[in-house]
Image (cartoon, rainbow, N blue to C red):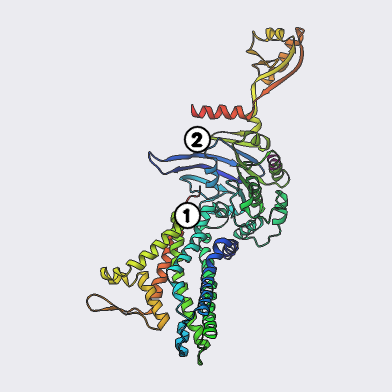
């Protein structure tokens, strides 16, 4: 299995146009947007003098940009990379090269850790850029970084956002890989995944009205519950028609999300193992 | 007992579809021994590539078995580790160089030593282009890289599906020499599919002719080409020779000589008859057929 992962790493690392663009997109966009903001702040004449912040508020402000990685833009990137890694093999016709030499299950499973490792690094760089831009903003536009900012707490809060971004990305990657295997296409795999994630975000809450027991084990609630816990330390309490509330512990939601992801991966493996490559 | 390197046992593939689907391969059985160069000959669409893909586990057979080194590949694909293959003219990651592609394949195969890659690229004539992206390779260069990929794991069995497609005349000659070397000098078994009769005739020991998904004939190349039912005679005067022979057997004048219906064993009697009657005999030889004529007659018969 390690050889399959090594081969996959070598393969994806060589795909500069798609893979590196996707992985660099978040940190580069954040840094770029910050540079534009700096220039704007420099040229505008009606700038107000910002009020001093508490250390906690300043640290909290570094977390806001994570919505970019955890939301639709992040899904788009994850769907794209999963589709390139899995659907690309169909487009390049390269399964004929590798399938005779390694078990199909290993070939497919090797793709997930490589994609996730890429996002782990990308999100870590994104977190560093998020903090650095806040520091530079404080130094250039003021007020200065407040006293009492706890570096350990700052890293921990960034780490929790990093974990949540990765959890979201694992789910999207699982959808993306399955969609790419089923459609045998990079573009179709990415599009189907984005449609699925969007539909899940738009209509997931309706499950609550239809059947609260299904809703509490659906990805929208699981991600929301885990996200709330990672951001604030408290899980959600969602009122249910009839007066009760869904308030599952984070461990249950994490286990349910893991089961979802395992199911999606298993389904992709089953379909992949049964396919003919003409 | 020598276990065949490759064995197909009533292998069949039917693609689902209307009216019972499409029967791409219909009960193909054959066996290839160690060190043989075996030709799998058939027109386009005959089922050659489908058969090879079933052998390489790219396609699941509908019925029958494909065995490598005595092991059914569907149940135990371990035998594929001793096989190198070239299908579809070499399919590679276009954004990687030829060398990087071979490294990816090596890791996929579990090989950690990349030392063979340089010499292999040299061997197939890609020494100078190995670091270029495959996207910029010509069809022939991809084909050569495909051969390098097929030899990367030093396989005991090399499966080549249409290996000369896209190659120029010089490339075809090199490929022919390479196939001969693989067998004669390195002792590898080669299973070669082609629709090019000349290629198969020149390099293969045995051939199976497949048409419409079924093997219509399997034999050594020599047996296929031998036609023990006619001899060609060059003699003078030709009219007299024809007159002497025609009462006993069918005779026709072809290209300044005679084509006489006779077996090889009858040649001494024919020569005695002609010489005894004062005819000067310059040459007498059993007539041979081209693989093309054999192939055409067999495939025509199977369609009849």
Q: Chain of mark 2?
A: B
Of residues A171 and A155, the one nearer the viewer is A155
Magenta segment range?
Answer: B171-176
What secondary structure is the magenta-colored segment mainly? helix
Disc 1 is placed on an element classified as: loop
Mark-to-mark CA distance, 2 and 1: 31 Å
| Residues marked 2 and 1, same chain | no
Crowd band around label 2 with a 10 angstrom C-alpha radius: few (<14), some (14–19), many (20+): many
Residue shown at 70% from the left, 48% from the top? B124
Residue A251 covered by magenta stretch: no
Residue shown at 71% from the left, 14% from the top? B270
Give the farthest residue toward the bottom: A147
Residue shown at 48% from the left, 42% from the top? B12
Q: Which residue is mark 2?
A: B212
Give the farthest residue toward the front: A45
Percent of width and height locating residue B31: 58, 41
Decide if residue A114 is on the left or right side of residue B281: left
**Nearer the observer, disc 2 or disc 1?**
1
Q: Is residue B82 visible?
A: no
Residue B285 versus residue B23 in the image, above or below: above
Percent of width and height locating residue B56: 55, 49
Indicate which disc residue A185 carries.
1
Decide if residue B198 is on the left or right side of residue A228: right
Toward which corner of the image does residue A67 lie, by quadrant? bottom left
Of residues B82 and A127, the one nearer the viewer is A127
Disc 2 is placed on an element classified as: loop
Q: Chain of mark 1?
A: A
Percent of width and height locating residue A22: 52, 65
Percent of width and height locating residue A151: 53, 87
């Amino acid at each position: 299995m390690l050889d399959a992962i090594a081969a996959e790493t070598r393969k994806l690392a060589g795909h500069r146009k798609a893979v590196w663009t996707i992985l660099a997109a978040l940190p580069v966009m954040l840094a770029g947007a910050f540079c534009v903001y700096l220039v704007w702040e420099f040229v505008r004449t009606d700038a107000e003098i910002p009020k001093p912040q508490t250390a906690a508020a300043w640290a909290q402000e570094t977390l806001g940009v994570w919505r970019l990685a955890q939301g639709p833009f992040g899904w788009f990137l994850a769907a794209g990379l999963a589709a390139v890694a899995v659907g690309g093999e169909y487009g390049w016709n390269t399964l004929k090269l590798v399938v005779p030499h390694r078990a199909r299950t290993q070939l497919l499973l090797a793709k997930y850790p490589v994609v996730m490792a890429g996002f782990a690094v990308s999100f870590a760089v994104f977190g560093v850029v998020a903090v650095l831009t806040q520091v530079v903003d404080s130094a250039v536009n003021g007020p200065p970084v407040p006293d009492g900012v706890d570096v350990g707490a700052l890293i921990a809060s960034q780490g929790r956002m990093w974990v949540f971004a990765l959890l979201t990305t694992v789910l999207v990657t699982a959808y993306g890989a399955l969609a790419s295997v089923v459609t045998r296409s990079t573009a179709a795999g990415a599009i189907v995944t984005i449609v699925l994630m969007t539909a899940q975000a738009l209509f997931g809450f309706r499950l609550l009205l239809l059947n609260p027991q299904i809703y509490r084990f659906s990805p929208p609630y699981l991600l929301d519950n885990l996200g709330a816990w990672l951001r604030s330390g408290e899980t959600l309490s969602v009122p249910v028609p009839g007066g009760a509330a869904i308030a599952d512990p984070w461990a249950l939601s994490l286990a349910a999300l893991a089961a979802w992801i395992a199911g999606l991966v298993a389904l992709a493996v089953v379909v992949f193992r049964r396919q003919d490559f003409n | 007992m020598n276990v065949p390197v490759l064995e197909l046992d009533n292998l069949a593939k039917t693609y689902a579809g209307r009216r019972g689907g499409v029967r791409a391969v219909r009960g193909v059985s054959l066996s290839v021994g160690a060190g043989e160069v075996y030709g799998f000959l058939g027109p386009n669409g005959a089922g050659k590539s489908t058969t090879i893909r079933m052998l390489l586990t790219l396609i699941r057979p509908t019925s029958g078995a494909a065995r490598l080194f005595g092991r059914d590949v569907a149940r135990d694909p371990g035998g594929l580790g001793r096989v190198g293959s070239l299908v579809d003219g070499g399919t590679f990651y276009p954004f990687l160089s030829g060398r990087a592609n071979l490294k990816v394949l090596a890791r996929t195969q579990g090989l950690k030593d990349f030392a063979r890659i340089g010499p292999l690229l040299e061997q197939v004539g890609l020494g100078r282009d190995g670091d270029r992206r495959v996207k910029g390779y010509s069809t022939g260069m991809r084909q050569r890289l495909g051969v390098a990929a097929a030899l990367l794991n030093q396989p005991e069995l090399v499966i080549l599906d249409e290996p000369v497609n896209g190659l120029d005349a010089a490339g075809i000659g090199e490929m022919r020499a390479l196939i001969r070397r693989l067998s004669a000098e390195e002792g590898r078994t080669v299973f070669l599919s082609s629709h090019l009769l000349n290629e198969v005739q020149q390099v293969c020991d045995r051939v199976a002719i497949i048409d419409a998904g079924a093997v219509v004939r399997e034999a050594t190349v020599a047996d296929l080409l031998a036609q023990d039912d006619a001899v060609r005679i060059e003699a003078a005067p030709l009219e007299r020779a024809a007159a002497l022979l025609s009462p006993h057997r069918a005779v026709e004048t072809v290209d300044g000589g005679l084509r006489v219906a006779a077996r090889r064993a009858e040649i001494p009697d024919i020569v005695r008859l002609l010489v005894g009657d004062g005819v000067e005999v310059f040459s007498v030889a059993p007539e041979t057929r081209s693989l093309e004529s054999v192939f055409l007659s067999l495939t025509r018969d199977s369609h009849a």
